[in-house]
Amino acid sequence: VEVPTALEIDIYKWPDVGGCPPDPTQAIAEELVLNLTGANRPRNGITLTRHMIATALCTKPNVEVVAVRGGKNDDAVAPLPLVFDFDEIPLITLANVTINVLVP
């Protein structure tokens, strides 16, 4: 059963080594969803972790994942890990992803 999953992610982002600005926050959220859907979708019974979310953004070298909170269905979000039962598959959509850019 696909379970709608909300994610709130706190990140730092900074210009790359060439001085180019980091991607817009929306593009970072899109990359995250792309890397957690389709063939890359987490399997049933998985435990979502901060490491898994950070790995999904590893193509963004000027982004650091600081903290991640998640919740199933309409539950309140709480710090990861977020455990899914064997018959549950996380359904992560752009509408359910919030990214907060922190200022160091």
Image: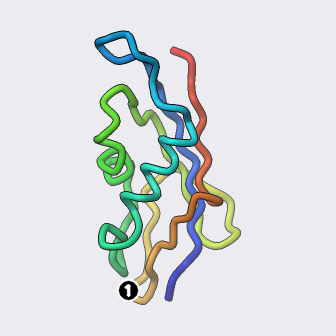
What element does badge 1 sit on? loop
**Residue 88, position as x, y percentages in the image:** 45, 83
Instruction: State how the image is colored.
Output: rainbow
**Residue 42, position as x, y percentages in the image:** 35, 70
46 horizontally vs 84: left or right: left
Task: Residue at 56% x, 36% y: name it.
Answer: 25
User: Considering only vertical position in the picture, is 4 above or below 56?
Assistant: below
Q: Amino acid at mark 1?
A: Phe
**Residue 46, position as x, y percentages in the image:** 35, 72
Mark 1 sits on what residue?
A: 86
Task: Residue at 44% x, 75% y: name it.
Answer: 84
Extreme residue in the top direction: 19
The quarter of the displayed image where residue 16 is located: top left
77 horizontally vs 84: left or right: right
Q: Nearer the viewer, residue 8 or 30?
A: 30
User: Considering only vertical position in the picture, is 68 above or below 35?
Assistant: above
Task: Residue at 62% x, 47% y: name it.
Answer: 98
**Residue 50, position as x, y percentages in the image:** 38, 48
The quarter of the displayed image where residue 15 is located: top left
Q: Nearer the viewer, residue 79 or 5?
A: 5
Q: Residues within 10 Å of mark 1 (few under 14, many from 20)?
A: few
**Count of numbered circles on the image:** 1
Task: Residue at 29% x, 41% y: name it.
Answer: 58
